[in-house]
Image (cartoon, helix red, strand yellow):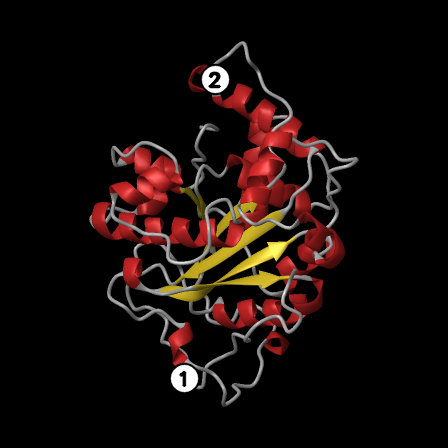
Amino acid sequence: MPYRDGGPAVIHPHHPPSPPTTSTFVHVVPHYYPAAAMVPPPSSYSPAMFSTASAVVVAKAEVRDVWAFNLEEELTNIAAMLPYYPCVCVDTEFPGAVHDDPGTPRYLRGPRESYALVKRNVDDLKLLQVGVALSSGAAGGRCRIAWQFNIAGFDPARDPHAPASIAMLRAHGMDLAALRDHGVRPDDFAAGFYRCGLGCGQLTWAAFAGAYDFAYLAKALTCGAPLPETLEGFHALVKGLFGPKVLDVKHLAKCCGIQGGLEQVAAAIGVERVAGRAHCAGSDSLLTIDVLMVMVDRFFRNCNVLSHAGTIADLA
């Protein structure tokens, strides 16, 4: 069950960290959301909420659950952080996949065949969680809070799902009853996404194997509308919703000669999970952004990682 007090608040600091003077791939936009979204800097703020360690792999972190009762508070906190952490990493959790193409192995599918399966599944299934982690884009510049939005609306008794996936999510701590009773309504999540500044179109976005992540977010932000019929239409929708700077960490890892899922890639470059558990959206978004920061620092110092923007694993 969720904490009724919503946990300790993340609030705007007395002396926020200066926007990074050098960055490999983010464009800092100091105040692109309405000024009303900012809150006065209370005296209870702790500077430890920000990561100032030289290596993101050692920075501690907290995953903050977001429910209907603390949605507005946490949206305000995200709005306060975005000018200093304009790189957003997302992860989603959903009820598995109910459509597949057993006749064609995944590694033999082309981008259009892969997208057709993404569309069929996302159109028919419901979003369960969205994880959001923030970074300045510079090494060591990761916010020490990640947010985990728990989305209401899924009922395993009537909504399609893959039973094995639901069992796995429950085993990793997902409380479906809590989502039903205390979760954020999808339309409230969509409205809050724009209200806090996440929808400004000027941020850098990232996910690991992000086809389903960006597809589920696109569905949520378009009031549950079906995804576009074509792959080209989907890419246009993603660019329209998130802007031109969309990265896929799995694709970047492959470019660096690193294969495998998120855990395998993290282990290969020495990044440890600092908070939460696997298959929880907040924790996975946090691990993904730590992996991204280390990869950019280690492998992309002499080139612009944004040359890979718009390339989503399995869809390009």
Q: Mark 1 points at which residue?
A: 15
Amino acid type at circle 1 is His
Residue drawn at (50%, 79%) of the image: 12
Q: Quadrant of residue 274?
A: bottom left
**Residue extending farthest top:** 103
Amino acid type at circle 2 is Arg
Q: Mark 2 points at which residue?
A: 109
Residue drawn at (42%, 19%) of the image: 107
> What is the x, y in percent for residue 223?
73, 46
Left or right of 189 on screen, residue 54 = left
**Residue extending farthest front:** 171
- Relative to 106, does residue 249 appear above or below in the rendering? below
- Relative to 39, does residue 183 appear above or below in the rendering? above
Q: Distance between the residues labelled 2 and 1?
A: 51 Å
Which secondary structure, mark 2? loop
Residue drawn at (27%, 68%) of the image: 53
Which quarter of the rendered picture does the N terminus lie within?
bottom right
> What is the x, y in percent for residue 114?
53, 23
